[in-house]
């Protein structure tokens, strides 16, 4: 059974810092990995999708990498801003019917 | 930009009552999903739906749950007799396809509170 882990559960950084959020998964037989952002009480906004054949994807200040063989992904946020404060969820796509298995998320607080 | 919509945003119901949660997926998408998130817990897969039938369901998705695409645009989740433990945020998602290249797009969620 696929398990996705995100550690730490919470992170607080000063504005302007570059930071890395980690995600690990137990079964490397994934189709892709998605990073999502969730604001309190809100829905899930997709940030980046990395297919299993890819190593990384970039969007603006965000860069996500994938090491499928070791079961790890990182989300790099450059020059963090208070508006980046949210919970960041990692999810892996497995199975012929494409279900996502989520981690519990990392709650990021960027201090002005 | 096309988006997934869900109604209502918040539903309060009494234990034992039936509820229907509604979703309008992105119009050209073919794969549809329901997930739920109990407060403070992980987002969990409930069911996937393609070509008017269930593709896969989790162990959570028991006989009390059903899904339907009644009219080609809506996608509904029915809970026949709600329990306290059904209180959660329910997310609908849709995707153009099932494979690695296809992103799942999520709606804003329906918060279900069972009293």
Image (cartoon, coloured by chain):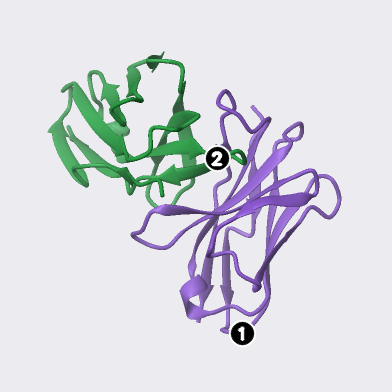
Q: Is residue A62 above or below residue B104?
A: above
Horizontal and vertical percent position of residue A26? 33, 40
Q: Which chain is purple?
A: B
Q: What label sits on residue A95 in the rendered view?
A: 2
Q: Which chain is green?
A: A
Q: What label sits on residue A13 in the rendered view?
A: none
Q: Chain of mark 1?
A: B
Front-most of residues A93 and B2:
A93
- Disc 2 is placed on an element classified as loop
- Disc 1 is placed on an element classified as loop
Q: If the image is split into quadrants, where does the N terminus of chain B sit?
A: top right
- Mark 1 neighbour class, 10 Å CA radius: few under 14, some 14 to 19, many 20 or more: some
Q: Chain of mark 2?
A: A
Side of B9 where A57 appears, left or right: left
Front-most of residues B14 and B53:
B53
Residue depicted at 38% across the width and 62% down the height: B39
Q: Nearer the viewer, mark 1 or mark 2?
A: 2
Q: Which residue is mark 1?
A: B16
Q: Are marks 1 and 2 on the same chain?
A: no
Residue depicted at 44% across the width and 33% down the height: A29
Horizontal and vertical percent position of residue B95? 64, 34
Horizontal and vertical percent position of residue A36? 42, 36
């Amino acid at each position: 059974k696929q398990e996705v882990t995100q550690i730490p559960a919470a992170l607080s950084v000063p504005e302007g810092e570059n930071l890395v959020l980690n995600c690990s998964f137990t079964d490397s037989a994934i189709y892709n990995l998605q990073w999502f952002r969730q604001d309190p009480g809100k829905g899930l906004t997709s940030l980046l999708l990395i297919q299993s054949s890819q190593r990384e994807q970039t969007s603006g200040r965000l860069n996500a990498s994938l090491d499928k063989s070791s079961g790890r992904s990182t989300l790099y946020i450059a020059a963090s801003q208070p508006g980046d404060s949210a919970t960041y969820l990692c999810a892996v796509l497995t199975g012929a019917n494409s279900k996502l298995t989520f981690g519990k998320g990392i709650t990021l607080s960027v201090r002005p | 930009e096309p988006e997934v919509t869900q109604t209502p945003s918040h539903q309060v119901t009494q234990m034992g009552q039936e509820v229907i949660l509604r979703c309008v997926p992105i119009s050209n998408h073919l794969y549809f999903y329901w997930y739920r998130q109990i407060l403070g817990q992980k987002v969990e897969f409930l069911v996937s739906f393609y070509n008017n039938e269930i593709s896969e369901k989790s162990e959570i998705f028991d006989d009390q749950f059903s899904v339907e695409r009644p009219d080609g645009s809506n996608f509904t989740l029915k809970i026949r007799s709600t329990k306290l433990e059904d209180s959660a945020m329910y997310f609908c998602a849709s995707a153009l396809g099932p494979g690695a290249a296809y992103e799942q797009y999520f709606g804003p969620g329906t918060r279900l509170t069972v009293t």
